[in-house]
């Protein structure tokens, strides 16, 4: 009898649901491009640590009770928990796209298959799909890479843990082994990350993200929830809560201030976040924690219990309801509408699909629903609403008319001198008396481009052929995903090859914010050159920050001019591809002629 009383018991920890709620809200805010949550992508890492802890804690409890781990049963529980909501989302998205955009549906075949088999993160890596340049018609399944990493963990970890317990029955050795694996993974992220380049490889990789899950697993080995005793001294309780509250404060600050292109994030920044998350979890799972009770309030626990459903449904709604990727952001009413749809879909998914399947009474649940008198009118209303939204989408696509491309702007209105204040982006940029036709520019090319260098990112690649046509001999060095932090290295390489001209155009900033001190260092090394900094237009939260920084730093140097692409392209959606950043052929011609006019003004 006493032996049974000593057996560990699983208990509900409401604070964990509170932490889930904070994490999923951060991710949703990030995908809505809300400025106060520019680091909301960190919420995924919090989920990784949580998964590592909870799963390992559960498996260790099962081992303690049964001296065995029923791996097959564990896998089936995980699949019942995860697959139904995802498959439901797939079906609804497929029906929507079949009715509104069948071509787009066909293009998502690889995303669908890789997600079903939980290898989506490696599919994205092998196909070189950037997480950070998904500006426009991104895949509505683009958030499922993280579920692939978690499911890969669920498949492999019970086996590895079972082997670990067999060969290292002492918790100390097991804990050390897990920490060694976590260290290897963290080092892999640091070594594979290349500053200045798109970090998608290390962001997506199971090998480079596993340390977050392993840190959670290590915490479960050394701080098992079922071993903790709520009878601790008041001083210890206060200390525990203060440490947890400090960790939570650090997490909120990181979510607010972190930029996804910050080098430090991939050079142990994610590791630091994982350790902070582990500290928070250690506090929340302790039965004596007051912080756990605070985060366990009803609104947060409700969100936490629905966090998986919210995560599954939020991204397709955001992507499929995005009317124009080049828009400057959604208004309050638009965000509220999308949030309402996300919450409704999550509730329906949770109540009528996920929970019935997880608890094995799916058929009974739906049999009772079908017999209910109000069910059939609800079906009719749902079909009517879906038909309405589909019809609205058809009408919108059918009536969408592309305006004709205007002539390029006068260079006097798009270039700022050192002592010239920043132009108001709403002013009229076309000077009827001084405008220059870009068609004329292509017919009568200006002086050749010897001694001119253009350094940029993927936008530079869009205009490469047009610039070279206008300026034969110009050196163009563009690369997808390039950031300002890489500019000095590119300059040094071009200088060593003898390809660095006396007039240098720098088009960088589309891929994230940068350190102003690094830009100043770059400009200090180029004081004998004429430099042109091009502002950016990108439907991301960092757009204004980048442009303000370019103008602030550029105005400090006599040899620097600002080419205000942001202002020149105001209300010119016809210049852009669907992503709102890259250019159509006409947009590339327009952009190229703008650069040429500036060079002519300073020749």
Image (cartoon, rainbow, N blue to C red):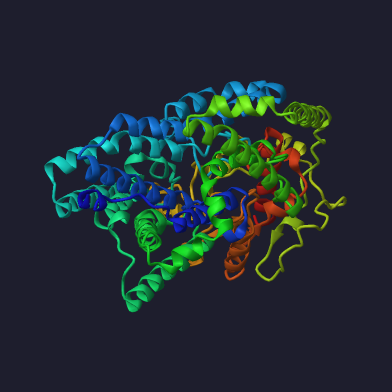
Please identify the residue farthest to the bottom as the structure is shown.
235
Residue 290 percent location from the top left of the image: 44, 69
- The location of residue 241, given as percent across then percent down, is 40, 71
Residue 80 showing in the rendered view: yes
Residue found farthest to the right: 433
- The image quadrant that residue 233 belongs to is bottom left
Between 364 and 577, the one nearer to me in the picture: 364
Quarter location, residue 371: top right
Residue at x-position 38% and y-position 46%:
51
Q: Is residue 55 left or right of residue 345?
A: left
Which residue is found at the position 43% from the left and 49% from the top? 47
Near-viewer residue (51 or 415)? 51
The vertical placement of 541 against 374, above or below, is: below
- The image quadrant that residue 350 belongs to is top right
Q: Position of residue 340 (x, y in %)?
A: 69, 46
- Residue 550 lies, in percent from the top left, at 59, 62
Q: How many marks?
A: 0
* Left/right of residue 470 with respect to residue 175 in the rendered view: right
Q: Is the C terminus in the top left, top right, bottom left or bottom right quadrant?
A: bottom right
Q: Looking at the picture, tell me which residue is in the foreground, 29 or 496.
A: 29
**Residue 527 at least partly seen:** no
Looking at the image, residue 92 sits to the left or right of residue 203; the answer is right
């Amino acid at each position: 009898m006493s032996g049974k009383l000593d057996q560990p018991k699983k208990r509900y920890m409401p604070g964990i649901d509170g932490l889930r709620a904070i994490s999923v809200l951060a991710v949703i805010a990030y995908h809505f491009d809300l400025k106060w949550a520019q680091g909301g992508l960190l919420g995924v890492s919090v989920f990784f640590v949580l998964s590592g802890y909870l799963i390992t804690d559960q498996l260790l409890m099962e081992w303690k009770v049964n001296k065995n781990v029923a791996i097959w049963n564990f896998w089936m529980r995980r699949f019942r928990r995860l697959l139904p909501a995802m498959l439901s989302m797939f079906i609804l998205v497929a029906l929507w796209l079949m009715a509104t955009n069948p071509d787009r549906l066909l293009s998502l075949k690889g995303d669908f298959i890789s997600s079903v088999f939980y290898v989506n993160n490696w599919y994205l890596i092998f196909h070189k799909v950037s997480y950070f340049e998904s500006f426009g018609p991104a895949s509505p399944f683009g958030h499922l890479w993280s579920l692939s990493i978690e499911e890969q963990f669920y498949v492999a970890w019970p086996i590895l843990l079972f082997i670990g317990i067999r060969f290292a029955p002492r918790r100390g050795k097991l804990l050390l082994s897990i920490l060694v694996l976590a260290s290897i993974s963290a080092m892999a992220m640091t070594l594979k990350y290349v500053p200045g380049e798109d970090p998608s490889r290390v962001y997506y990789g199971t090998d480079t993200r596993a340390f977050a899950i392993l840190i959670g697993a290590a915490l479960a080995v050394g701080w098992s929830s079922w071993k903790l005793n709520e009878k601790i001294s008041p001083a210890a309780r206060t200390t525990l809560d203060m440490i947890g509250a400090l960790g939570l404060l650090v997490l909120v600050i990181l979510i607010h201030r972190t930029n996804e292109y910050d080098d430090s994030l991939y050079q142990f920044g994610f590791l630091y976040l994982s350790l902070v998350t582990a500290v928070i979890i250690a506090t929340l799972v302790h039965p004596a924690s007051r912080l756990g009770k605070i985060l366990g309030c009803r609104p947060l626990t409700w969100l936490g219990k629905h966090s998986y459903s919210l995560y599954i449904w939020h991204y397709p709604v955001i992507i499929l309801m995005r009317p124009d990727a080049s828009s400057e952001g959604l208004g309050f009413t638009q965000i509220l509408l999308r949030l309402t749809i996300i919450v409704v879909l999550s509730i329906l998914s949770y109540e009528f699909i996920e929970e019935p399947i997880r608890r094995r009474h799916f058929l009974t649940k739906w049999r009772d629903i079908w017999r209910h008198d109000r069910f059939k009118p609800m079906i009719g209303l749902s079909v009517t609403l879906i038909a309405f939204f589909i019809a609205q989408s058809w009408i919108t696509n059918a009536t969408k008319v592309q305006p004709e491309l205007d002539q390029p702007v006068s260079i006097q209105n798009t270039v700022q001198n050192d002592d010239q204040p920043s132009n108001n982006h709403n002013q009229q940029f076309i000077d009827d008396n001084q405008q220059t036709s870009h068609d004329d520019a292509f017919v009568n090319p200006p002086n050749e481009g010897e001694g001119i260098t253009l350094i940029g990112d993927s936008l530079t690649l869009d205009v490469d052929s047009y610039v070279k046509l206008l300026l034969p001999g110009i050196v163009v060095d563009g690369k997808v995903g390039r950031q300002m932090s890489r500019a000095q290295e590119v300059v040094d390489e071009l200088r060593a090859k003898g390809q660095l001209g006396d007039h240098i155009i720098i088009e960088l900033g589309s891929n994230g914010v940068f350190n102003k001190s690094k830009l100043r260092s770059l400009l200090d090394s180029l004081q004998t050159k004429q430099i042109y900094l091009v502002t950016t237009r990108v439907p991301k939260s960092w757009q204004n920050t980048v442009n303000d920084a370019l103008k602030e730093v550029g105005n400090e140097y006599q040899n620097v001019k600002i080419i205000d692409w942001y202002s020149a392209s105001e209300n010119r959606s016809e210049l852009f591809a669907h992503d709102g950043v890259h250019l159509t052929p006409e947009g590339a011609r327009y952009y190229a002629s703008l650069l040429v006019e500036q060079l002519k003004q300073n020749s």
